[in-house]
């Protein structure tokens, strides 16, 4: 399952930043998932809970932020946010568009109970 491998990758990134976490250390993990990535967020939450349930991360909350799809129109050159499955420029209706964001998957933040671990360069 797609979501299971993403959940495992999130866990790998968490362990990179917090090696050998003790129980009740990690409060939450914040990830941003682009709407274009076709990730079922409920399913991802379920998978994350399943693979952490008998580990020190049991109870760690997965916070998912769905990031919008942004396009650049090659015709009118305007930048817009669009919802799938409409793949035309909302300004001029042209379908020659370039997707500039919405496909990314990133671990943004690992919140510990006593500090915040800011994460950089952590594409899933
Ligand atoms: Zn346009």
Image (spheres, helix red, strand yellow):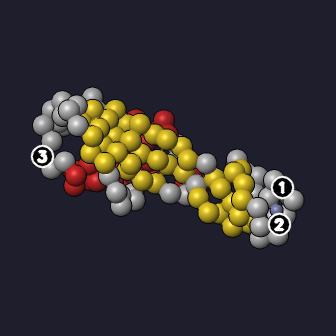
Determine whether the residue tagged by mark 1 lies in a helix, strand or loop: loop
Determine whether the residue tagged by mark 2 lies in a helix, strand or loop: loop
Determine whether the residue tagged by mark 3 lies in a helix, strand or loop: loop
Quickly name the residue at label 1. 91
Q: What count of labels does the image hold?
A: 3
Where's the C terminus, which quadrant? Answer: bottom left
Residue 107 visible in rendering: yes
Asked if the residues shown at circle 1 and circle 2 are in contact, with their CB atoms under 8 angstroms apart, the answer is: yes
Q: Residues within 10 Å of mark 2 (few under 14, many from 20)?
A: some
Quickly name the residue at label 3. 20
**C-alpha distance separating marks 1 and 2:** 8 Å
Quickly name the residue at label 2. 76
Residue 58: where, in percent of width, then height?
24, 32
Residue 70: where, in percent of width, then height?
65, 56
Q: Residues within 10 Å of mark 1 (few under 14, many from 20)?
A: few
* Image position of 82 (left or right of 15): right
Placement of 93 over or under 117, stated as above or below: below
Placement of 116 over or under 100, stated as above or below: above
Question: Residue at 15% across / 42% down in the picture?
Answer: 21
N-terminal of the pair, mark 1 or mark 3, is 3
Question: Residue at 15% across / 50% down in the picture?
Answer: 19
Confirm or reject: label 2 Cβ below 8 Å from ligand 1. yes
Q: Where, by quadrant of the figure, is residue 120 drawn?
A: bottom left
Residue 38: where, in percent of width, then height?
56, 51
**C-alpha distance separating marks 1 and 3:** 51 Å
Residue 8 visible in rendering: no
N-terminal of the pair, mark 3 or mark 2, is 3
Ligand 1, what quadrant?
bottom right
Confirm or reject: label 1 Cβ below 8 Å from ligand 1. yes
* Image position of 67 (left or right of 9): right
N-terminal of the pair, mark 1 or mark 2, is 2
Placement of 114 over or under 1, stated as above or below: above
């Amino acid at each position: 399952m797609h979501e299971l491998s993403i959940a495992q990758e999130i866990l790998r990134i968490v362990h990179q930043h917090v090696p050998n976490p003790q129980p009740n250390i990690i409060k939450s993990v914040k990830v941003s998932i682009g709407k274009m990535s076709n990730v079922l967020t409920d399913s991802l939450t379920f998978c994350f809970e399943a693979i952490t349930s008998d580990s020190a991360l049991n109870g760690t909350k997965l916070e998912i932020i769905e990031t919008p799809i942004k396009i650049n129109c090659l015709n009118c050159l305007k930048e817009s946010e669009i919802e799938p499955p409409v793949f035309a420029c909302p300004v001029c209706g042209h379908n020659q568009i370039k997707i500039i964001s919405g496909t990314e998957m990133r671990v943004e933040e690992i919140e510990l109970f006593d500090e915040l671990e800011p994460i950089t360069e952590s594409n899933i």
